[in-house]
């Protein structure tokens, strides 16, 4: 490829991402300088936080500035290297992220890949969303055998891993998802005890049915009415890791808080937000457990791969409409 296609933020979205908010431009492929490497991106991770980064709201990282390349995690292959630590052909995760074909980077994380460890594993079972699931559930949720764990967005990249880890810890696990097919997948394939289709069922009534002993841990990915229903049924000293609030990210005005927030007090519950980067110093804990769980088949992962960098903004919207199952990824170019 003789050009470097790059998606740049043209204007901040109001509500849903719209055509014209991002602009696809073509530039020359960059040349690495001293100590640098040139990476050709293969896969681009699409995540709800992409929408947050486009806004100028208070957030955990500086927002993407107007005119800058859209931020996003990638996996790529080293094409040229002026760094003795890297050679052409190395598979890496660049520290310099972005929606683009090529990036010149001062550093990257080398990935070990092989017949039993495909590149996509680092977007799925060994990727950021799996790390998020692991620490959010185990460090904040602290599930105990026999407890009831409820997971929203259960068929998503994070939720699907959360529920499986909770089952490994001996819990009764109930998911919430947006279609019968997704519910069937998390129960039949991933081993959840039950799954509620929030589009067709009354969530509070369904939770009463599936959680007869109340709710001890709620892994929060969506916010809104589902959070209210869960708060109604939480047990004494329940724990609520707040990973995401995707139902609010496209709101074009203030979002009301949960009506049942008083139960945080009445039930002496813990509600704690977290970001995966908080746990980078403890990443060895994840890699001590997860590879073994994957190899034994105790944890399964799924990557929903779409084609073409040019399609990234349209594909991103599937995260907000429920059009994906598992980890949503765009393939930018061929694997080596």
Image: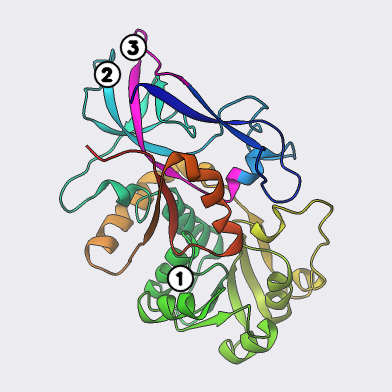
Q: Marks 2/1: CA distance?
A: 41 Å
- Picture coordinates of residue 45, whole percent (x, y): 45, 45
Asked if the magenta segment contains residue 158, the reply would be: no
Circle 3 SS class: loop
Q: Tell me the tag on residue 80.
A: 2
Q: Nearer the viewer, mark 2 or mark 1?
A: 2
Residue nearest the viewer, comparing 306 with 51:
306
Q: Which residues are magenta?
A: 27-50
Q: Which residue is mark 1?
A: 163
Asked if the magenta segment contains residue 30, the reply would be: yes
Residue found 61% across the figure and 79% down from its top? 215
- 83 with respect to 331 (left or right): left
Q: Tell me the tag on residue 35.
A: 3
Q: Marks 3/1: CA distance?
A: 43 Å
Mark positioned earlier in the residue sequence (3 or 2): 3
Residue found 50% across the figure and 81% down from its top? 180
Q: Is residue 29 above or below residue 334?
A: above
- 52 with respect to 266 (left or right): left
Residue nearest the viewer, comparing 169 with 196:
196
Q: Quadrant of residue 232?
A: bottom right
- Picture coordinates of residue 69, whole percent (x, y): 56, 28
């Amino acid at each position: 490829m003789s050009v470097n296609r790059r998606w740049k933020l043209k204007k901040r979205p109001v509500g849903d991402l719209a055509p014209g908010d991002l602009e696809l431009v073509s530039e020359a492929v960059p040349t690495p300088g001293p100590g640098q490497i040139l990476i050709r991106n293969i896969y681009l991770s699409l995540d709800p936080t992409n929408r947050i980064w486009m806004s100028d709201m208070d957030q955990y990282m500086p927002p993407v500035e107007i005119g800058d390349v859209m931020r996003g995690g990638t996996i790529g292959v080293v094409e040229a290297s002026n760094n003795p630590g890297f050679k052409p052909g190395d598979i890496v995760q660049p520290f310099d992220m972005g929606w683009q074909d090529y990036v010149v980077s001062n550093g990257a994380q080398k990935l070990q890949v092989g017949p039993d460890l495909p590149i996509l594993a680092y977007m799925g079972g060994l990727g950021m969303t799996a790390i998020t699931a692991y620490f959010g559930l185990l460090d904040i949720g602290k599930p105990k055998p026999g407890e009831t764990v409820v997971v929203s967005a259960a068929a998503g990249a994070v939720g699907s891993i959360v529920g499986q880890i909770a089952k490994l810890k001996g819990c009764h696990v109930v998911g919430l998802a947006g279609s019968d097919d997704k519910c069937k997948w998390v129960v039949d394939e991933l081993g959840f005890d039950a799954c509620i289709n929030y589009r067709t069922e009354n969530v509070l009534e369904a939770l009463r049915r599936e959680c007869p002993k109340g709710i001890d841990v709620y892994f929060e990915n969506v916010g809104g009415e589902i959070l209210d229903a869960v708060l109604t049924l939480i047990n004494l000293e329940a724990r609520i890791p707040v990973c995401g609030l995707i139902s609010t990210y496209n709101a074009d005005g203030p979002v009301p808080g949960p009506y049942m927030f008083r139960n945080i007090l009445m039930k002496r519950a813990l509600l704690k937000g977290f970001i995966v980067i908080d746990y980078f110093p403890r990443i060895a804990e994840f890699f001590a457990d997860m590879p073994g769980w994957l190899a034994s088949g105790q944890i399964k992962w799924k990557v929903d791969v779409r084609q073409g960098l040019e399609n990234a903004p349209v594909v991103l919207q599937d995260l907000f409409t429920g059009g994906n199952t598992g980890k949503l990824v765009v393939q930018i170019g061929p694997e080596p």
